Amino acid sequence: MSTCDQVIYQLALNFITGGEEVEYMNTPKLLIVGSGTMGSGIAQVAAERGLEVVLYDMKREQIDKALTTINGLLQKKVDKGKLAQDEKDSILARIQAVDSLGEKAAACDFVIEAIFENFAAKVQLFQELDKVCKPEAIIISNTSTLSISKMAEAFRDPTRFMGMHFFSPVPVMRLVEVVRGEKTSDATLAKGMELVAALGKTGVIVKDIPGFLVNRINCLMYNEAARLVEAGVTTAADVDLAMKLGMNHPMGPLEMIDMAGIDVATSALEALYEMTGNEAYKPAGILQQMVKEGRCGRKTGKGFYDYN
Ligand SMILES: NC(=O)c1ccc[n+]([C@@H]2O[C@H](COP(=O)([O-])OP(=O)(O)OC[C@H]3O[C@@H](n4cnc5c(N)ncnc54)[C@H](O)[C@@H]3O)[C@@H](O)[C@H]2O)c1
């Protein structure tokens, strides 16, 4: 970590600890529950930034897979001369895998939940965390679509619960949407923002609305792009070219959903349409048709573009 990063980090630590003088080594402990795509990425970033990480997943093999992935990504940095071997070893040593939500989990200052996107499963986990964690711990959900305010009902003290929507791949993407539930307190929100800073990310605060901020806007863009192609106004290639050259987007909206999966993009629109009632989110006919035909983008070899 650079000197500049250490100063920012120390400021963040001071805030987290209520402004008390703390040693640099007195780092906040972060429990991550769920070590899939997101949990693994968050664990890597946190450990790289000097936080002590406790990593738990209901499947031990998922933790081992996450540790192998993190090791591989760090090794690439070592091979490129961007990271010293001893720094890599220290980063890995800061991630402690656990097989249960026991004592080590109870000692954590922050918990980030990154399990399956299932309301009942998350609520059940939160009820367990409510019993296990220390009373001042801040609990965070990385949900993409579920209501923070509704999930907050799982806690005796819902003021210490908030959302934090990371983007994939976590080590690369700089933004975190910091989601304020109806009962999230100012202090929790402030500590959450400091955690985001300590992770080297930039946070934007958003109220607990369906799709938060980025997906709310992004879904409209790709739905409209698909509608224009469907109406024969232009071609997929020209839509993408226009958005890249005219708006400086690194990728066109249709290339982007071919990569994410047309089925995934269509389900996101359906969910937003159901939650908001806004016709603009109703999936374009062409998207629904493509899903029916199995033209789901790169993963199926065909989407708006042909990958065969
Ligand atoms: N993948 C993305 O691009 C992305 C982006 C932003 C947010 N999210 C959100 O992050 C969360 C995780 O997504 P992901 O893509 O990492 O999922 P994933 O399927 O890759 O990983 C989920 C992990 O959670 C574990 N798990 C499930 N239930 C558990 C429980 N009760 N206790 C402990 N572990 C449990 C699973 O074994 C699995 O390893 C979801 O809420 C998702 O909506 C995903």
Image: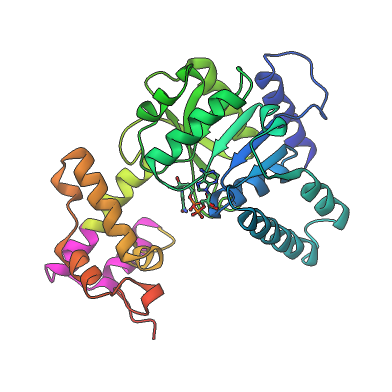
Furthest-bottom residue in this view: 308
Residue 51 x/y as whole percent: 72, 37
Residue 198 x/y as whole percent: 66, 34
Total labels: the figure holds: 0
Q: Is residue 305 visible?
A: yes
Query: Residue 228 lies in magenta, yes or no?
Result: yes
Range of magenta residues: 224-248
Closer-to-camera residue (246/184)? 184
Relative to 155, is 32 on the left or the right? Answer: right
Residue 27 x/y as whole percent: 76, 30
Closer-to-camera residue (43/86)? 43
Query: Residue 54 lies in magenta, yes or no?
Result: no
Residue 100 falls in image quadrant: top right
Relative to 89, is 226 on the left or the right? Answer: left
Task: Give the residue at x 19% y 64%.
Answer: 288
Relative vertical location of residue 86 with respect to residue 259 in this rendering, above or below: above
Quarter of the image with the N terminus in it: top right
Task: Give the residue at x 31% y 58%.
Answer: 265
Task: Give the residue at x 17% y 62%.
Answer: 227
Quarter of the image with the C terminus in it: bottom left
Closer-to-camera residue (214/161)? 161
Relative vertical location of residue 38 with respect to residue 158 in this rendering, above or below: below
Residue 15 x/y as whole percent: 66, 19
Q: What secondary structure prevails in the magenta region?
A: helix
